[in-house]
Every structure is written in C-alpha cells, then in structure tokens.
Amino acid sequence: MKLGIIGLEQSGKTTVFNALTGSDKEIGTFGKISAHISVIKIPDKRIDWLKELYKPKKTVYADIEFVDIPGSINDSSDTKIVAAAREVDAFVFVVRAFENLHLPHALGEINPLRDFEQIKTGLIIADMAIAEKRIERLKKTVTKGAAPTEDKTELSVLEKIMHTFESEQSACSANLSEQEEKAIRSFQFLTMKPFLTLLNVSDSDLNANKTLNFVKSLPECMAMSANIEMEIQRLEQNDRKSFLEDLGLKELSLNSFIRNAYKTLGLISFFTVGLDEVRAWTIPKGLSAVKAAGKIHSDLERGFIRAEVFSYNNLKELGSEREVKSAGLFRLEGKNYVVQDGDILSIKFSV
Ligand SMILES: Nc1nc2c(ncn2[C@@H]2O[C@H](COP(=O)(O)OP(=O)(O)O)[C@@H](O)[C@H]2O)c(=O)[nH]1
Ligand SMILES: [Mg+2]
C-alpha cells in the first residue's frame, strides 16, 4: 500500500513523515526538494507469534510505503505535485493546528477547517483539469456520430463528475454505479482516492477541547503532535516510554495510525505460513480467495484449484495445525470464498 502525505506548505508534512517512518529528512524546506519515500514494516503480533511457531527461514511483515509529497497541494500550477499524487493508493492529509510564532501561516490565522477545504479544493481543481480536457476531445468524436458506445458512456460519466466538481464535491460523492466507475477508472482521479486526515497539533494541545472538536469535525481525522513524536522516534526504545507518558500517550501514533488506516481504507491481512516463509498480505475487505491468490502470484490466480484455510485464532488457541485439523477447523474453500482477516491460506493450483 502506497500512502501519499499531502497538505499545504509548512503544515508539517515532512515532520509527520519523519515521525511515522523514523526518517531524518530536513524540515522547513518549503517544498524545494523532491519527494521522500520510506517503507515501514507493519508491526503485527500475529506474525511475531507465527514466526515462533514455524521458525521459518524468512519472515515478511506487511508494509506501507509513505511518500512525502512536497509543496502545497492547492497550488494547481505545480504539475509535479499532482503527478506524484496520482501514483498513490490513498492520502494522508496533514492539516496544521499548531501555533508557532516563528512560522506565521501563509493564509493568516490557524484554521484547520479552512485548510482541509483548501486541500480538497486543490484535488478537485486538479481532477477538473483532467476531466475537462477529456470531455472536450470526446465531444468532438461523439458529435461526429461515429463514436463507439464506450466513448459515449465515458463522456456521460465525465459530465456527471464534472457537475459534482462544480458543486465543490469530490468524485467519490458522485454516486457512480460500478459500471460507471469502471469507465473512468483509468483517470485515477485524486478525489476518488480514500484519505485519512492528520491534525498536526502542539503537544500542549493534544488533549485540549478544541483539538477534540476539530477531530470530530474533520472526516477520518486523528490528532498527532508530529514535532514531538519525531523527537521521541529518535530516542532509544527504553527511553521512549516516560516521554510518551508525559504526553498522556500509551504508544507512538504510528500504531493507532496504522489501525485507522486499515479501518478507513477497508483493509485486512491474511497469512501464508511454512518452514520457508511466514508472511502477511494486505488486501481490501471482501476479496475472493482467487483474487487473494493473485496477490501472491498471478500463476496462483490463473491456475487456482482451491484454498485450504484455517484461522490464526484457532491455531493460536489449539497450538498446532494438527490440533486444528482434528478439531475440524481446517476447511477447503473455492474461488469465491471471501477471505477473512486473520485467515491462514494455502493455495492449491495447477498451470
Ligand atoms: N510548533 C510546532 N512546529 C511544527 C510542528 N510540526 C511542524 N512544525 C514546524 O513547521 C515547519 C514546517 O515543517 P515541515 O515538516 O517542513 O512542513 P512541510 O512543508 O509541510 O513539509 C518546521 O519549521 C517545523 O519545525 C508541530 O507539531 N509544532
Ligand atoms: Mg516538506
């Protein structure tokens, strides 16, 4: 999964990037440098436990790739920003709530709701430019009369979306049918992508009422004090606890961030196990066994015969695969079985 960190200039994007990934990139650079990338392993106690049980040669955790996209997303003249944003699966909107006397906000007072709208507008404007261009071209062929049906469908969907944009709404609120959505999927509209909002607050405001109110008012929002978490990330593991306690936190925001990301983006994990490898795979909720097999390798999807399935919870409770089998909790499932969070899968296939 690839997450793009976007927001206004000087909202703390790079600070958030450092805080979440433990990187050490320069902050306060005014977007003058190119995007930063860092991949983090997603901590998962289930994988830790499976590793102990199977003692595999290799253990692979699921991961998230963070891309710190510099500059300001409401600057639609910056094509590099938009191009980088198209590449990601989902966004982290960084919204500034921290006061900093040395760093006045370019738009005046600190106002997270306004800044959230600015980000949204930036994305809508970028999408409108794409839709407009395509509509213009399609209109030419469709009015000539010789256009294929797909072009007509595409045009009507794009016009529908254009209406949505004109009323300052995201493409995802255009209520498209699955078929309509398919017709325009290739455009990778930015406002179709799911997002999380990270409210970047001063550490003294972490539990303040105004923070709680902003978190409630903004969609998919959580608060974080990026500056201080970046500092804590730099400490030795043993020294972190007392600093976190002082802030009234149980853990670094990374953990709750990952939980929120899975929930908001509708993701689950399944596992493959064995003496060679124990591995976590991230998939969208509702995926069929055959599609999940395709995540592992395209051959497994093409030649899919069946999935052998048992659950992590049963394995943990009973202690071994043999016990799971004799308890009748080992199942054979077909192509259309919907994979559940915590399933351990073994795909039988032939190509
Ligand atoms: N007081 C305070 N300053 C912050 C916080 N987060 C970021 N900053 C400052 O805001 C400035 C811009 O941060 P940066 O991460 O480079 O923002 P970007 O332009 O969005 O990448 C830097 O001077 C940071 O020190 C915070 O939580 N509190
Ligand atoms: Mg930056």
Image (tube, rainbow, N blue to C red):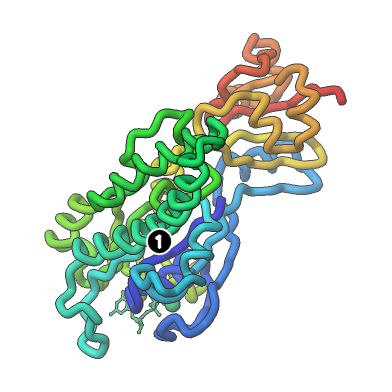
For disc 1, the marked residue is 126
The x and y percentages for residue 36 are 55, 72
Residue placed farthest to the front in the image?
A: 144
Q: Is residue 159 above or below residue 137?
A: above
Query: Which residue shows up at 68% across the image and 37% down it?
Result: 295
Spot occupied by residue 215 in the image (x, y as percentages of width and height):
22, 54
State the SS at label 1.
Answer: helix
The residue closer to the viewer here, 340 or 5, is 5
> Between residues 295 and 59, which one lies in front from this camera angle?
295
Along the viewing direction, whichever of 111 and 131 lies nearer the viewer: 131
* Number of marks in picture: 1
Q: Residue furthest bottom?
A: 102
Quarter of the image for residue 100 reads bottom left
The picture quadrant for ligand 2 comes to bottom left
What residue lies at 58% left-to-right and 22% top-to-bottom?
Answer: 314
**Residue 15 visible from this viewpoint:** no
Looking at the image, is 165 positioned above or below residue 66? above
Question: In the displayed structure, would residue 31 be above or below residue 258?
Answer: below
**Amino acid type of the residue tagged 1 in the rendering:** Ala
Q: Residue 217: x, y in percent?
A: 18, 52
Residue 264 found in image quarter: top left
Q: Position of residue 236 (x, y in %)?
A: 51, 73
**165 left or right of 26?**
left
Identified at 36% across, 73% down, the residue is 75
Q: Residue furthest right?
A: 351
Graded by Cα atoms within 10 Å as few (under 14), some (14 to 19) or many (20 or more), the crowding at tag 1 reads many
Q: Up-down: is 160 above or below 10?
A: above
